[in-house]
Amino acid sequence: MSGWQELKAERNRRSLVRLTRALPLLFPRAVLTRALARPFAPPTPRLAIESYWGAHPIRADRLARALAARSQAPDGWRWRLGDRRSGLPFTFRTPPAPFREHAHALGPGFCCVCSQPVYRFGWHIDLWGTGPNQNAVWHSACVVAWQFWNAPSSQIQLLRRLQSRRCAQSGGRLWRSAEVDHRVPLFRVWSEHRDTPWPLLLDFWGLPNLQVINRDIHAAKCATEARDRASRALSLLQTPNRAEARALQDD
Ligand SMILES: [Zn+2]
C-alpha cells in the first residue's frame, strides 16, 4: 500500500472504532449499513445519520413533508414576508415555515421545519425511549430537505436520473445544460396559492413541483412567466395592493 492509502486505512480504522464505541444498542439499520460501507466511515452516530440523509435528499424531502403533514400551522398563521428581525422570510422563494418565525418557535426538542419532536441524534423516531432531544431544533432529515427546497439545482444529477435523463416538458434527451425548474413557478405560488394550508404548501418546494427541462424550453417558459408576472404586477399597482406588487417586482 502507498503511504496515502495506509494513512487512509488507519484513519478509517480509528473512525470505525470511535463509531462502534459510541453506537447505542439500537440504531437505524440503513444508516449503519451505509456508514460501514463508506470509504471514510463517519466517526460518530450523529455524523452517520447526517451523512445518510445527505446522500438521500429525496427521501429527506419526502420525510420532512410527511412529518409536517402531522402538524398544523399555528392558529391565525398566514404566509407573510418580512425581515430578519421577525424571522419572516424576505422572499417568496423561501419555503414557508411557521415554526421558524420567532412568534411561533417551539424551542428545543421540536423541529423548526416540521414542528414534530426531534429525538437523539436528530432522528425523527424515539428508538431509545429518551424523549425529545433538548439540544436540537432540527431533524437531520429536515436540514437536508430544507437545503434541497432552497437550492434544488444542487441535486440536478439526482433529478436527471429520476427522469431517466429525459426532458420533463419535451420528452427529448436532456442536454448537459438542462436546468431545474418549478412546474408551478414560485411567484405564482405566492400570488395564487398563498392560502393553501400549510403544510400542503411545502409540496411546491418538494419533488412534486420539480422538474429538469432543457435550457431552451426553460427560457421559453420563463419568458411566458415573466410576461404573466409583469402584467400581474401592473394590475396590482393599479389597486391598493402595492406591497404585493413590489414583492413580485423585486424578487
Ligand atoms: Zn423536522
Image (cartoon, rainbow, N blue to C red):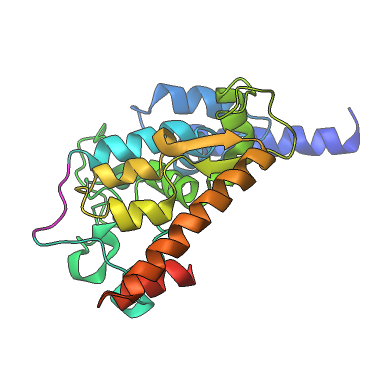
Residue drawn at x 35%, y 75% as measured from the top left: 237
Read off the magenta span: 71-75
Is residue 142 in view from this perspective? yes
In magenta segment, residue 73: yes
Relative to 21, residue 245 above or below: below
Q: Nearer the viewer, residue 161 or 5?
A: 161
Q: Nearer the viewer, residue 72 or 195?
A: 195
Expressed as whole percent of the image width and height from the top left, the position of residue 37 reads 61, 24
Residue drawn at x 54%, y 39% as measured from the top left: 18
Residue drawn at x 27%, y 74% as measured from the top left: 241
Q: Nearer the viewer, residue 106 or 119?
A: 106
Q: Residue furthest left?
A: 75
In the visual, does 160 lie left or right of 204? right
Q: Nearer the viewer, residue 71 or 2?
A: 71
The N terminus, quarter of image: top right
Q: Main secondary structure of the magenta part?
A: loop
Is residue 82 in view from this perspective? no
Expressed as whole percent of the image width and height from the top left, the position of residue 88 reads 31, 69
Relative to 224, residue 104 above or below: below
In the visual, does 107 lie left or right of 87? left
Expressed as whole percent of the image width and height from the top left, the position of residue 116 reads 22, 45
In magenta segment, residue 233: no
Q: Residue furthest right?
A: 2
What is the number of callouts on the image? 0
In the visual, does 213 lie left or right of 199? right
Relative to 198, residue 67 above or below: above
Expressed as whole percent of the image width and height from the top left, the position of residue 174 reads 68, 28
